[in-house]
Image (cartoon, grey):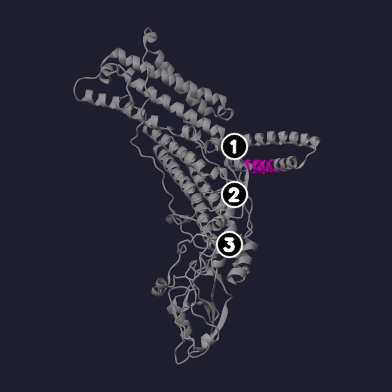
C-alpha cells in the first residue's frame, strides 16, 4: 500500500475520517449508556438529568455526522489536478477499520485442528496481516485494485482453512460505516470480505474521478472505471445480502450502482462534445436525446425508500442539481435547433429525415402542433424554441437555487461557475430574439424523450486476472484439509514389505487415500484403516503427492521398514447446522441469521416428512462407482447404514454426507 504517513490530500481526508469515526463511536457509547440508565431508573430527578444529557449527546452526534458528510463531499480532492471546467464527479471514500491480530487464533487452530506446530506458520500469518494492513492505504491505480482483490481472494482460502461453520474463531473484525461513521463489529469473516470488496468499488470510483476529462483518452478511462465500479458494487449487493453495515446494504448499493452508471454516461456526453458541438440539425438532435438520458433515474433512486435515507444529503442534492442541469441543456439544444435554423427545410429527403428525427424528440406532441408545419413555419419555430428556452431557464434557476441551499455544495467553486455560465447562455439566447409576441405565445414545451446510441452497462469483476497463491498451502489440499473436516492426530504406521506387497492400495490424487486394505496384513494390525489419508512417508510431507509418487517413496527403501503417518476422518455431521449458506458465482453469501428450525420441529413433530438427501451428499451407489480421491472420506467400506427418523438436526447425520 501507499505510505500512510504521506501528507497527500487523500491521506489527510482518511486520517480525518478515522478521527471522526472514533469520536462518533464515543458519542454512540455515551448515548447507549444514557438510554440504558433512562430505562432502568424510576427517580424523576435522575430521569431529567439523563434526558438533558441525551439531548447534548444527540446534538454532538449530529454535528459529527455533518462533519463526516463534509468529508464525503470533498470531491475536489479526488479530481484531476489539471484545471477543468466540468462538474465534479463523486467518488466513494474507503472504509476505516481497526487493527486485527491473526497470530494467536490461527496458531491455536493449526495446533488443535491440523495437529501441526503453529509457530512454523508465523511467516504466512505475518503475510496475511501485512496484506490486510496494506489494503487500508491502496494506491489509486490498477496496482491498488489488484492488491485489494488479492487480499479478498486470499480471504476465501482463509475462510475455508480456519473458520468452521460451527463456532467462532475469536477474531473480531471492526469496520466503520463510510456514511454515518457507526462501527460494525462481528466475528464473521464475511464482514471483512464485504468491506474489502466495497473498497475495490470505492477505489475504482476514485480512479475514475482522477482521470483527465479534457482529453478523449482520459474520458474513456473514466467511463471504464465507473462501469467497473458499478459492476463491483452490483456483485457485492448480490453476494453479501445480509451485511449489517448500512453503506453495504442491497438498497444502498443499488443506488450507488445507478449513480456510477450515471457518471459514466456523463463522461460519454462529454466525449461527444469534446471537440465542440457543431450547430447542425442532426448533431443537435443526437446531443439533445443523449443529454436527456444523463441522471434520468439517479435522482429518483436516491429518494426511494430503503436507500435514500442512508445517502448523504449533499450527494442527493448534487444528483438533483445535475439532473436539472442536464434537462436544461436538453431544452437549450432543442431551442438552438428551432431558433438557429429558421430558414425552414427544403423539400425532398432532407425534409422527411428532419421531420422523423424531430418527432422522435418528444414522447407526445402538444395538441394542435404539427411537426412538419413547425419546421416549415418561421413563427411557430420561434415560439416553440422560446418555450424550450423558458423551460431551460427554469431548470437552470432551480439548479442554482438547490446549490445555494446546500452549504457543502456552495463552497465548490467550479460547480457554481458551470451552472452560472449555462444559465447566462440560455438567458442570452432568450433575450436575443424579438419579444413583442411573447405574451401571446401559449405553447408549452413538451418533455424530451431520452435516447442513446451508447450502451452503458456494468462490467463484472474479472477474478481470473488476479493470480493468488494460498498462503497456507503447506497445510495440504483444500478439498480435504479444511475447517469443515475434523481429523484424528497423525498415527505412525511402521510398514513392513510382505512378499513385495504392502497389503493395501492407494487411490486418487493428493493426498493418497488407503484403498482395498487387507485386514490380515501387518499394517492393519498396527492400526491402518480403510479410508485413511497418508500425510507423510519417512518423515517427509506428502500431502501434495499422488499415488505413484507415494508408492515410489515406499518402494525406494527396498525391504527395510519405513514409517508412514496417516490420519482418519472424524464424524463432523453431529455439529453441523441443518441449513447451509447459499452460494453465488462460487462465492459464499452471508447467512448471518442461521435458522435451526426448532419451531418447525415442534409444529411438524407429528407429521411424517419425506426422506430427503442432504446438501452435497452422494449415495452408496455413487460412492462405490467413484474411484477418485476428490471424494471426501466417509464411513468404513462394508458397514451398513442405520435407518432412523430424520429431523432438522439429524438431516446431515448420514454416513454419505461429504464436507
Query: Disc 2 vs disc 1: Cβ atoms closer than 8 Å?
Result: no
**What residue occupies the far bottom of the structure in this picture?**
499
**What residue occupies the far top of the structure in this picture?**
436
Q: Residues under labels 2 and 3: Cα distance?
A: 39 Å
Q: Does 96 sit above or below residue 545?
A: above
Most prominent secondary structure in the magenta stretch? helix
- In the image, 70 versus 165, the foreground residue is 165
Query: Disc 1 vs disc 3: Cβ atoms closer than 8 Å?
Result: no
Q: Does 647 sit above or below residue 324?
A: below
Q: Report x, y in % for residue 436.
A: 38, 7
> From where the camera sits, is residue 210 visible?
no
In magenta stretch: residue 26 = yes
In primary-sequence order, the first of circles 1 and 3 is 1
Identify the magenta region: 16-29
Q: Give the residue number, with chain letter if any, for mark 3.
A: 166
Q: Report x, y in % for residue 331.
A: 39, 23
In primary-sequence order, the first of circles 2 and 1 is 2
In primary-sequence order, the first of circles 2 and 3 is 2
Q: Callout 2 environment at 10 Å: few (<14), some (14 to 19), or many (20+)?
A: few
Q: Residues under labels 2 and 1: Cα distance?
A: 21 Å
- In the image, 303 versus 467, the foreground residue is 303
Point 65% across, 63% down: residue: 104
> From where the camera sits, is residue 460 visible?
yes
Disc 3 secondary structure class: loop
Q: Quadrant of residue 75?
A: top right
Q: Does 483 sit above or below residue 242?
A: below
Q: Report x, y in % for residue 588.
A: 49, 56
Q: Nearer the viewer, mark 2 or mark 1?
A: 1
Q: Give the residue number, with chain letter if any, for mark 2.
A: 3
The image's mark for residue 71 is 1
Amino acid at each position: 500500500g501507499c505510505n500512510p504517513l504521506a501528507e497527500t490530500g487523500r491521506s489527510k481526508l482518511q486520517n480525518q475520517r478515522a478521527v471522526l469515526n472514533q469520536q462518533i463511536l464515543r458519542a454512540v457509547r455515551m448515548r447507549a449508556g444514557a438510554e440504558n440508565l433512562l430505562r432502568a431508573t424510576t427517580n424523576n430527578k435522575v430521569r431529567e438529568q439523563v434526558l438533558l444529557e441525551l439531548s447534548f449527546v444527540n446534538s454532538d452526534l449530529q454535528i459529527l455526522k455533518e462533519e463526516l458528510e463534509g468529508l464525503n463531499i470533498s470531491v475536489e480532492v479526488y479530481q484531476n489536478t489539471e484545471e477543468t471546467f466540468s462538474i465534479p464527479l463523486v467518488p466513494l471514500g474507503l472504509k476505516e477499520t481497526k487493527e486485527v491480530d491473526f497470530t494467536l487464533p490461527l496458531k491455536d487452530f493449526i495446533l488443535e485442528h491440523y495437529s501441526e506446530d503453529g509457530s512454523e506458520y508465523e511467516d504466512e500469518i505475518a503475510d496475511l496481516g501485512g496484506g490486510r494492513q496494506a489494503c487500508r492505504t491502496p494506491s489509486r491505480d490498477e496496482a491498488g485494485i489488484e492488491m485489494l482483490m488479492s487480499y479478498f481472494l486470499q480471504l476465501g482460502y482463509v475462510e475455508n482453512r480456519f473458520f468452521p461453520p460451527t463456532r467462532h474463531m475469536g477474531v473480531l473484525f471492526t469496520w466503520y460505516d463510510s456514511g454515518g461513521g457507526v462501527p460494525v463489529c462481528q466475528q464473521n469473516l464475511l464482514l471483512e470480505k464485504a468491506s474489502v470488496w466495497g473498497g475495490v468499488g470505492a477505489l475504482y470510483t476514485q480512479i475514475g474521478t482522477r482521470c483527465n476529462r479534457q482529453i478523449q483518452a482520459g474520458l474513456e478511462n473514466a467511463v471504464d472505471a465507473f462501469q467497473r465500479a458499478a459492476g463491483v458494487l452490483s456483485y457485492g449487493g448480490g453476494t453479501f445480502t445480509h451485511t449489517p453495515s448500512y453503506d453495504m446494504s442491497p438498497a444502498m448499493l443499488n443506488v450507488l450502482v445507478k449513480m456510477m452508471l450515471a457518471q459514466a454516461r456523463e463522461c460519454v456526453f462529454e466525449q461527444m462534445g469534446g471537440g465542440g458541438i457543431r450547430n447542425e440539425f442532426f448533431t443537435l438532435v443526437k446531443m439533445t436525446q443523449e443529454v436527456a438520458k444523463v441522471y434520468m433515474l439517479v435522482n429518483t433512486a436516491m429518494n426511494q425508500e430503503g436507500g435514500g435515507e442512508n445517502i448523504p444529503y449533499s450527494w442527493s442534492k448534487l444528483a438533483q442539481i445535475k439532473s436539472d442541469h442536464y434537462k436544461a441543456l436538453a431544452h437549450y439544444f432543442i431551442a438552438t435547433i428551432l431558433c438557429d435554423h429558421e430558414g425552414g427545410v427544403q423539400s425532398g429527403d432532407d425534409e422527411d429525415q428532419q421531420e422523423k428525427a424531430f418527432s422522435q424528440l418528444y414522447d407526445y406532441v402538444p395538441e394542435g402542433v404539427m411537426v412538419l408545419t413547425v419546421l416549415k413555419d418561421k413563427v411557430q419555430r420561434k415560439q416553440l424554441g422560446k418555450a424550450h428556452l423558458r423551460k431551460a431557464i427554469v431548470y437552470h434557476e432551480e439548479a442554482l437555487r438547490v446549490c445555494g441551499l446546500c452549504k457543502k455544495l456552495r463552497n465548490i467553486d467550479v460547480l457554481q461557475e458551470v451552472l452560472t455560465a449555462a444559465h447566462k447562455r440560455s438567458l442570452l439566447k432568450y433575450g436575443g430574439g424579438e419579444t413583442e409576441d411573447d405574451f401571446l405565445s401559449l405553447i408549452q414545451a413538451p418533455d424530451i424523450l431520452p435516447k442513446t446510441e451508447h450502451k452503458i452497462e456494468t462490467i463484472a469483476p474479472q477474478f481470473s486476472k488476479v493470480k493468488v497463491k494460498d498462503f497456507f498451502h503447506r497445510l495440504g489440499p483444500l478439498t480435504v484439509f479444511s475447517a469443515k473436516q475434523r481429523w484424528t492426530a497423525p498415527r505412525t504406521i511402521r510398514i513392513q514389505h510382505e512378499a513385495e506387497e504392502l497389503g493395501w492400495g492407494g487411490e486418487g490424487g493428493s493426498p493418497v487415500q488407503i484403498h482395498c486394505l487387507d485386514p490380515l496384513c501387518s499394517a492393519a494390525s498396527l492400526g491402518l484403516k480403510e479410508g485413511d489419508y497418508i500425510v507423510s512417508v519417512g518423515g517427509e510431507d506428502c500431502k501434495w503427492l499422488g499415488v505413484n509418487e507415494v508408492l515410489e517413496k515406499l518402494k525406494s527403501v527396498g525391504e527395510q521398514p519405513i514409517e508412514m503417518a496417516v490420519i482418519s476422518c472424524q464424524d463432523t455431521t453431529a455439529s453441523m447446522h441443518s441449513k447451509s449458506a447459499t452460494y453465488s458465482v462460487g462465492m459464499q453469501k452471508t447467512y448471518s441469521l442461521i435458522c435451526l428450525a426448532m419451531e418447525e420441529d415442534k409444529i411438524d413433530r407429528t407429521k411424517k416428512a419425506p426422506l430427503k438427501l442432504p446438501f452435497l451428499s452422494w449415495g452408496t451407489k455413487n460412492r462405490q462407482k467413484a474411484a477418485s480421491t476428490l471424494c471426501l472420506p466417509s464411513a468404513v467400506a462394508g458397514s451398513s447404514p442405520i435407518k432412523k427418523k430424520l429431523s432438522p438436526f439429524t438431516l446431515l447425520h448420514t454416513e454419505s454426507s461429504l464436507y
